[in-house]
Structures are given as C-alpha cells and as structure tokens.
Image (cartoon, rainbow, N blue to C red):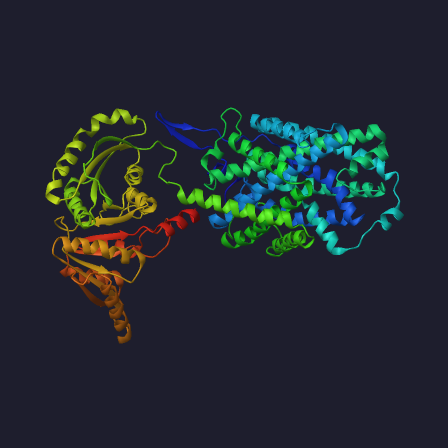
Amino acid sequence: MKSEGQRAAAPTADAPTGETNEQGPKVVAGLSRDLGLVSALAIGTGTMIAAGIFTLSGLAVGYVGSAAIVSFLLAALVAAFTALTYCEFTSIYPFSGEGYLYARKTFPPLLAYLVGWCLLLGYTSSCAFYIASLSSYFNEFIWHFAISALPGIIFLAALTLLNVKGTKESGTFQIVVTAAKIVLLVWFIAGGLGGFDTGVIADRFIGDVPLIASTAALVFITFFGFSAIAASAGEVINPTKTIPRAIFISMIVVTVLYALVVLVVVIADLTEYTEAAMGVAARAFLGPIGGMVIVAGALFSMISASNASILAGSRVALSMSQLRHLPGVFSRISARSHTPVVALVAVGGAIGVFALLLPLESLAHFANLVLLLALCFVNAALIVHRRRFPDMERPFRVPLVPLLPALGIAANIYLILQIPVQGHIQPVVLAILALALGLFAYAAWRGTRFDVPDPAGPGSRVVALRASPRTAGFRILVPVHNPRTAEPLMRLAAALARPRGGEIILLRVVQVPDQLPAELARASITGEERMLAGLQALEGDIGVPITTEVRVGRSVGRAILESAREDRSHLIILGWKGFTTTARKILGEVTDDVVRLARSDIMLVKFGGEPAVPRRILLPSAGGLHARKAKGYALGMTDANGGELTLASIVPANAPDDRRTEEEERLARERAELPEDAMVATRVISGTGVAESIVAAASGYDAIMVGASGESFSNNILFGTIPERIAREASGTVLVFKGHDRVRAFVGRVAAD
C-alpha cells in the first residue's frame, strides 16, 4: 500500500515536466501546493454562492413560488451523489483535472476526451453566466453602460490576469470575497425573516412536480462548486483529506443559505420575479443603503465565482494537454508564477465569447446540460473503476456502490431531459453543436498530428545530402545500419522500386548524445558519407535512382520518421535481427518507434545465411489486410529474379476435408487477382501449429514473407507472436510486412492513448 507521500511522488498530470535544450535537460516548473482547507472552502463556496443565488433565486420563485426551496434542495441532492464520487476519486488521484482525470484513468481515451470537453464547455459557459449576471446587476443598480456586456468583460480580463499572476494571490482574494458575501447573505436573511409569514409561503407554493424538477435543472449550476474544489487538487495541501472535507462543508453551508435566501425572496411578495429580484427584495427589507450593500455583495459573489471557474477550467485544460488530449501549448507553466498561462488566457477568451453570444437563461441551461452530461460519465467511471481496480487503495470510499453512482446517473439524466421538455430547445441544439465541434476538432488535430518519439527533444537535421537528378513517384526509404546487409537491402529495394518507376533513399543516422550540439557532430559523419557514396555508385547497376542522406539526431527512430515524412516515402525497409532480448520492447527500440508511428508501408527483413534478394518466396495468407498488400511486393521480388511466389494457407492436420477445399478455393481466388503470366503457385499446408507449420514448409524457399498479425491499433502488440516466432525459428530469410491504411491509421491516432 502506498502512502500519500508516495502517491504524490508518482508521475501525474501535475508533475513538473522536463524539456531538453541544446545544453541538455532542463526542469520546467510545476504547480505549487498553496491552498489549505480555508482556501478550498472559499473556492467551492465562492463558486456556489454566486450569480446562481443572486439571479436564479428570483427566476426560480417566479416559476414555482415557494416551491423553489424544493427545487434547490432537489438540485443539492442530485449534486451530492456526484460529490461523493468526486471525494473517492480525489482520494485516489489528488491532482488537478477532476472529472476529466478520473475518466482518463478509467475509460478509453476518446470517451475521456469527451468528458474533459464537456467540463471545459461547462466551466466556460457557467463562468460566462456569472459574467453576464454581473453585467446585468451592474447596469441595473450601479451604472447603465451603452454596451451592456462591458462591465463583465472588464472584470473577466482583470480576473484572468489575477489568475495568471499566481494561485496563492487568487486564493487569498477568494477567501476575502467569500467571507464578505456570506456575511452579507446572513444580513439579508436576518432582515427578511422579520417579515416571516407562513400564509404567504403557503399561498405562493406551486405544486407542479415537472415544473419543480425543471426549475431544479435550471438552478443546478449553483451547486457545481464542489467540482471546482477537485479541479484545484494539484494546488491543495494534503488533498486526500482536505478536498472531501471542503466539498461536504461547502455544500452543507450553501444549501442552508440557499433555502433561507429563497424563503426571504418569497416573503418579499414582489410583483415581478426576475434575475434582479433579490436586489429589489434587499431594498424592501434593508432600505436603500442596505439594498445597495446587498447588490455590492452580489457583484462580489459573481466575481469570486468567476475567479473560481477560471481557475478550475484552466486546470482541466492543463490536465487534458498534459495527457495529450489538447495541444502541448496549453500545458506550459510559467516558471515565475507557477500558473498555466496559455490555458488561463484561452479559458478567459472562451468565457468572453459565451458571455457575448448567449442570453442569461440560455447560458444557465447550456452550462447545466453539458455539466450534467459530464457528471453522468464521472459517476459511471466510479462503477467501472471499482471493477477494474478492486484492490486499489481508496482512502475515501463511497458506500453502496454501484447503487449511489447509478442513482446519480439517473438523477442527472432526469434533469437533462427537463431542459428540452420545458421548451428550452436553443441550449440543447447549441450543446449538441458544441460537442460535435469538439469531437471534430480533436479528430482533426490528433488524426493529422505527426507523432515522434521524444517529442520534447529537438528534431534531427540533414548534414549531408546527395540527391539523384532523377525524380520518381514511388520512394523507398532504406535506413542503413549494418554494412553487411546494406547492399542486399538496397538491391531488395531496387527490385521493388524498378517496376513502379521508383527511387531509393539511403539513410544513415548518426546518433549524438544529449550534451553534444548537433552542429558539432560534423566530424563524425565523414565515414558515413563514404559508405553511402559507395552504395550510390551502384545506381547504374541496379537501374534505380538513389539519393543518399545523412542525418544527425538524438533519436534514431525519430530521425527515420522525420526523413520518411519529409521525403514522402511510400515504403520503409528495415533490417531486423528477428527478435529482441528486451522484454519491454517487442521488436527493438528503433523498430518499435518506426512501426508504431510511420505513415508508410513497413517491411522488416531478417536475412538468413548469405544476404540476398529472395527468388522463391512462401507467403502464408489468411486473407488479412497486411498479407493482401504484401502480395504485390513479394511478386515484385520474385519477378525481378525470375523466381516464384507461393501463396499458402495453413489448416490443422485434423481439419475436415471441406475446410481444406475452402482454403484451396480461397487461394485460387487470390491467385486470379494477380497477372496471368506471373509465376505464382498455391499451397495448402497441414500442421499442428501455424508458426511450426510455416517453418517446416519453408525448406524449399529462399524466404518466408508474413503479414502483421491482426488489425489492432495497440501499441503493445505491433506484429503479434507468430511473425516473431517464425523469424526466431526459421533458418532462412524472413520478411514481415505491415501495410499502411490511411483510414485505419487515422482512426488509430484519434483513439490512441
């Protein structure tokens, strides 16, 4: 079992990240833990005691009268289910990112991204609701601006700059403002309860249950502050104990205050209940001066809630970036202020856009919808997480799992459905469009991104290039490592390039240590140029244009991938020893990187005996994608040397005759797809095991060519065990082929962890 200190030391989304510069590695600043229980309470309470109570209390009373108290209590109950889930997850993962981080640890990457995107939308739109409410109050009670949204935008800019300056400063500000507005609310409640009248409360009670439920959906945003506490876990001192305490204390305090505030607003018996009803009630109970003080308190409440939402939203963006669901720029942390500056500015900008585009009530419904959707997934994550990791240490455990999380899901879904049922269609449509836009943007970014090993380090650079004067539409990249196999690999590539009118790019990578600047490695490449020049001199003999290239870099795999991308190579041919002695590497470090990330066809070549281009090739095929594409390359090699290709199928020795007949017919169809004059035979091989049968049948052939196993995008099983066993046990040449399919590769990059 790990102690809290051990958990905090583990690599996480909040751990400082390292970058490499020309002088070597450097340390990048991480978030600092400056927030105690009081600060965490201020974040949660400050977010909940905000525009929601000052604006939505009047709207709620306008809808259902004194039954608004029931709506607020119902919303609090629904929030409590998910708050329990947050407490358990925070005790396990006491780091920034909250609901997104929990989903990332539980669900497939794409689903986790959707949760994070919902939370980002929820935080920015709910903060926009606070900013828009601030503008409404400012224009109503302080000063009317020609541009009504201007007061809120000014405060938004100031709060963003405050958060950029540092968490400690914004946390102190949050404590002061939250304490002040609690005092003001108590004053408001005390003044209003003097006119307590049970008759008015009873008369104003509207018992329309669906309307009470839809009102609960409207005011749910006021209770979402508990997630803002969890979102700041990376900056909270002793988060495992502090955050659950802060969540429960803040929710209890806020629920009591809300019920009493709504009661006072009802007692005021106003003629009209709008978003400014609480300010009007304050004037009635406390006089003009008292009313203005309450209005000031409302403004400060909206400011503090906005501050907490900016903080929470930026930490979700930070976590998504560090876990590769947003571009890396969002994870940059200022060494001076220890804050994610880019994430803060981006979140502030998104808040401004929402505040300018949507009216107040639509903002509330939009924020509620996406937040409730995210909370459905978070509750589901707890159920799945308990089953996936039953033995994990959980300092805080939610009782009655899966019952309580399931109730949370059901309650959240019910509140979501109330939004369209009550005719609020615009926020629903906007939410659907926003979610679709987020998924499209994510797919476009991840699907088109060029991935390389060691992305934090510098790229390779070309230090010597001898380009062939002839250009070709088909390019084969041959990284040269072993001088013994360099010429055979080149001749094999020539056999494939010639019928396609292609060219060969011979690449030699000089790996330099991190401490050595790349420009100082020039002295080490003289011998590499001579070797490549000797191979290029064979251009006339093999009849294929040859370009030679020497690259200097810190990662051989990265240099090969960068060369393949820049030269737009269609096929990469790699020499391979056929196995690896390192358990964590399937094919070898360099080969693993290239096979996993290249956007080209890949052919691994393990020569047996004297290296040469094979004439007679056995190609076992079960009709898979890689084997189908490998046929064209295998036929090119056998035709170049006047050899023969044999298409084979493996059937168990005890298989019925009709199974053998089926395979013979399938092979005949595959043969019919190839040119009639091509030297191609078919063969059905019987045996007790696939790999053993292929190796046993290979004695009459120069090489075995096998396609990569399966269609999986897994990073852990690149080729499968059968090709590796064949390569290990066969005495002759073994060629392993993996075809590149753009659609499958695109989906694989989008769905990758």
The location of residue 358, given as percent across then percent down, is: 64, 40
In this view of the protein, which residue sits in the foreground, 78 or 691? 78
* 153 to 700, vertically: above or below: above
* Residue 371 visible somewhere in the drawing: yes
Q: Which residue lies furthest to the bottom in this view?
A: 657
* Residue 232 visible somewhere in the drawing: no
The location of residue 549, given as percent across then percent down, is: 22, 35
* 572 to 299, vertically: above or below: below
Please indicate whether residue 700 sits to the left or right of residue 295 in the image: left
Please indicate whether residue 658 sits to the left or right of residue 425 in the image: left
* 331 to 619, vertically: above or below: above
The location of residue 652, given as percent across then percent down, is: 27, 69
Residue at image coords 32%, 47%: 583
In this view of the protein, which residue sits in the foreground, 658 or 125? 125
Please indicate whether residue 56 sits to the left or right of residue 333 in the image: right
In this view of the protein, which residue sits in the foreground, 556 or 208? 208
* 506 to 626, vertically: above or below: above
The location of residue 119, given as percent across then percent down, is: 57, 43
Q: Which residue lies furthest to the front in this view?
A: 146
Please indicate whether residue 507 sits to the left or right of residue 487 in the image: right
